[in-house]
Image (tube, rainbow, N blue to C red):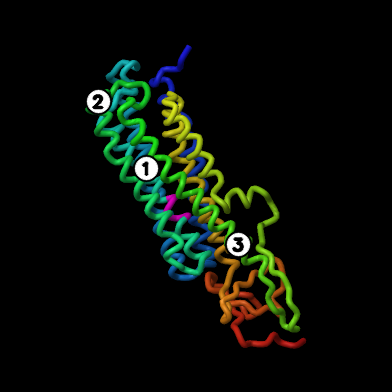
């Protein structure tokens, strides 16, 4: 027996409520880290605060709209009409794409930093992200006109809906590949240590596979991929993931923000030298003998890697 769209939407709302609670806890942690540790540069810090604020506002607005719809449906309307398209649901559907877009822009910003602020690298991901958002915007209105009671997206708008969610997926794949490729390439470049020896610098990964999943945005990518498949196959389960996915997008993006705040994100362990090479340092390694420029950190301790400058020799002890 096929699951009705009403049941799918109700299950999705319950999942979103749970995930929203998880997100709020993670958000508080991220704010505490950003306030107390303040390990990123002033410009990057502004971007992080803006991203954190927008993610919270949009994900909260989406949850509030769904909660209001759920309350009204239980109070006045029969449950059989729960999934029927309303203006509140239309606004909630738009919020899903807004949260998705903010997450994509955060990933693109990280890619831009890792690639030393080269704009040509992020042109295609930006076009794909905004193109997907543009495809999604008219869908709620079209659904309201064509068939607001349809358990799955009507056939007429399936291609547009699929494109609207596939393009952000392409953005994620491109950006993740660009970040991973850049880190892999630079980590294999031999650099000179203080003794004139050629050494290989490695990117710190935090020692846990979970850190790599957070760093690469894989949680975000997998959610997008599953959602695109469900939409393309017109599976009613897409209603579950469309609601739960909103909070997953916010959680994944906030986990990245936490890593940036802790100073263990890849763009914070990379620093350009005068001959266009990039060096890496371990978070646990002593700063003695290291020549690095801490572009993305504000640590002011004299023995911190972030305060070492090119041309300065290490103190002899």
Residue 288: percent from the left, percent from the top? 71, 79
Residue 141: percent from the left, percent from the top? 24, 33
Say few, some or many: other residues with alpha carbon within 10 Å of mark 1 (under 14 / 14 to 19 / 20 or more): many
Badge 3 element: helix
> Which residue is under mark 3?
183
The C terminus: image quadrant: bottom right
- Rendered residue at 58%/80% (across/down): 275
* Residue 300 visible in the picture: no
Are the residues tagged 1 and 3 within 8 Å (C-beta)? Answer: no
Is 57 drawn above or below residue 299 in the view shown? above
Is tag 2's residue or tag 1's residue first in the polypeptide sequence?
1
> Which residue is under mark 1?
97
Residue 185, quarter of the rendered image? bottom right
Q: Nearer the viewer, mark 1 or mark 3?
A: 3
Which is nearer the eye, 111 or 124? 124
Query: Is 69 placed left or right of 188 in the picture?
Result: left
Badge 2 element: helix
> Which residue is under mark 2?
146
Say few, some or many: other residues with alpha carbon within 10 Å of mark 3 (under 14 / 14 to 19 / 20 or more): many
> Which residues are drawn in magenta?
103-107
Specify the farthest residue to the top.
1
Is 315 drawn above or below residue 185 in the view shown? below
Is tag 2's residue or tag 3's residue first in the polypeptide sequence?
2
Q: CA distance from mark 2 to mark 3?
A: 48 Å
Q: CA distance from mark 2 to mark 1?
A: 21 Å
């Amino acid at each position: 027996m096929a699951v009705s769209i009403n049941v799918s939407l109700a299950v999705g709302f319950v999942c979103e409520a749970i995930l929203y609670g998880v997100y709020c806890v993670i958000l508080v942690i991220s704010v505490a880290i950003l306030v107390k540790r303040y390990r990123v540069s002033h410009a990057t810090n502004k971007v992080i605060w803006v991203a954190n604020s927008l993610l919270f506002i949009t994900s909260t607005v989406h949850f509030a709209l769904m909660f209001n719809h759920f309350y009204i449906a239980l109070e006045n309307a029969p449950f059989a009409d729960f999934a029927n398209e309303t203006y509140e649901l239309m606004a909630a559907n738009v919020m899903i794409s807004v949260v998705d877009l903010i997450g994509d822009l955060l990933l693109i910003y990280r890619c831009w930093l890792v690639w030393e602020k080269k704009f040509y690298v992020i042109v295609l991901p930006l076009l794909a992200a905004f193109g997907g958002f543009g495809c999604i915007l008219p869908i709620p209105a079209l659904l309201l006109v064509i068939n607001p009671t349809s358990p799955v997206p009507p056939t007429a708008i399936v291609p547009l809906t699929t494109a609207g969610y596939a393009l952000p997926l392409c953005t994620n794949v491109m950006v993740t590949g660009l970040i991973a490729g850049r880190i892999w390439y630079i980590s294999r470049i031999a650099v000179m240590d203080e003794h004139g020896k050629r050494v290989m610098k490695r990117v710190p990964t935090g020692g846990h596979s979970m850190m790599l999943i957070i760093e690469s945005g894989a949680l975000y990518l997998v959610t997008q991929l599953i959602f695109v498949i469900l939409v393309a196959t017109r599976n009613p389960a897409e209603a579950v993931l469309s609601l739960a996915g909103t909070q997953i997008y916010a959680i994944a993006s906030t986990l990245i923000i936490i890593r940036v705040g802790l100073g263990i994100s890849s763009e914070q362990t990379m620093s350009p030298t005068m001959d266009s090479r990039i060096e890496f340092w371990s978070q646990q390694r002593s700063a003695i003998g290291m020549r690095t420029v801490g572009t993305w950190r504000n640590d002011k301790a004299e023995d911190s890697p972030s305060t070492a400058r090119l041309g300065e020799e290490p103190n002899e002890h």
